[in-house]
Amino acid sequence: MSTLAELVLPTAEQELWRYSRIGELDLTSYRPGMLQTTVSGAKTTDESLIPHDAVSSEAADMFETLNAASAQVSHIATKRGEVVTTPIVVEHRLDEAGVVCASLLEIDAAENSEVTVVERFTSGADARSLIVPVVRIRAAQSARVTYVHINELGRATWSIGYQRASGERDSSISTNTVALGGDYARVRAGVRLIGVGANAKQVALYFADGTQMHDFRTLQDHAAPRTRSDLLFKGAVKDTAKSVYTGLIKIRDNADKSEAFQTNRNLTLSSGAWAESVPNLEIETNDVKCSHASTVGPIDDDQRFYLESRGIRPEIAERLVVFGFFADVIDRLPAAAQPEALRERVGARL
């Protein structure tokens, strides 16, 4: 972190950063900083007990390398057969401007254990800084992990984050992202299913207005037979806000009888708003079930007309249509994500 000016940033010409705002980032104007981090409901685990095996087939980029060199680390680990009944909450707060801060959350779920972890990021309205958060999730055989990432950053803060997860035999991983804050907020989320019968669900809800931008890059990597993944990302943009989604389903040649589903849908609520959706498939074996779908467009005129024809004012009709659009993704969020409070925040943004 002491040599930020020496780091070579990627460019939007690179496919992984296509459509991004990376060209606006000037690391020479930042200095190393610290997040205010609190963990409730968990015991700190000795780092020597954490198995630091790879959880992703993707090569680390410069921001992950920066994170590895300087992150503030939190460890959460369960014992074999342990069921943690209360969600563990990790809170990160940033109020300082002109800094780069990195956090690393390690979640290791032992065999047949269960845990829910909520990680929340907030910052001051004037905190013009960069956060680089990484979470690494390892689910052992038959383990069940639920992870919730909540972005409520101030409008001046950038976030370039990573979610890496791997699942062993018959494990279940659920990663859930709620992205409402930040100036430019990027999440690169990958799950790797390495054990027979492993299962993963990825859910995200994002809403951008003003000049915000949300940027998602996902990977569903099936590296074992009879694995299953299901992804649902839904977002809305208004004013001159932007969103990008690029996803890849990768079925390896040894992953027979796997199932993978990928859906991304976007609402553009203003003429100046913009969204891009690019789903992809890479399948190396025939005995699989896969599908992907994406849409980008304004509110359906028929739905709006139906409501207005029954005496509902146009602005209320639009609000109801947006609530309906988000309903299935909110219903999939775990209780730890506080879905009812989320509905209220989305309503306030409308």
Image (tube, rainbow, N blue to C red):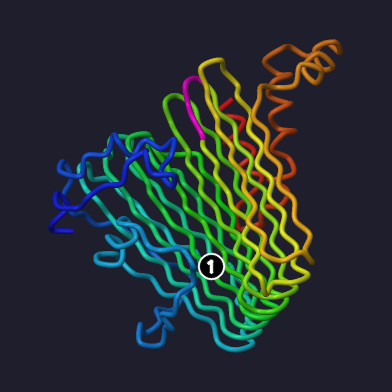
Q: What element carries label 1?
A: strand
Compared to 4, does 298 lie above or below?
above
Quarter holding the C terminus is top right
Q: In which quarter of the image is the N terminus?
A: bottom left
Q: Give the range drawn in magenta.
A: 239-243
List x then y, in percent, for residue 227: 71, 70
Pointer 1 local density, CA inside 10 Å: few below 14, some 14–19, many at least 20? many
**Circle count:** 1
Residue 50 appears at what percent x and percent y? 42, 83
The residue where tag 1 is placed is 165
**Residue 64, above or below 77:** above
Camera-nearest residue between 103 and 7? 7
Give the answer, above or below, for where 151 lies relative to 175: above
Residue 348 image-quadrant placement: top right
**Residue 251 magenta:** no
Q: Which residue is drawn at 69% across and 20% down?
A: 318
Residue at 72% from the left image edge and 34% from the top image edge: 325
Asked if residue 88 lies left or right of residue 129, the reply is right
Task: Give me the residue at 20% from left, 42% from top.
Answer: 98
Q: x, y percentage for residue 15?
A: 44, 44
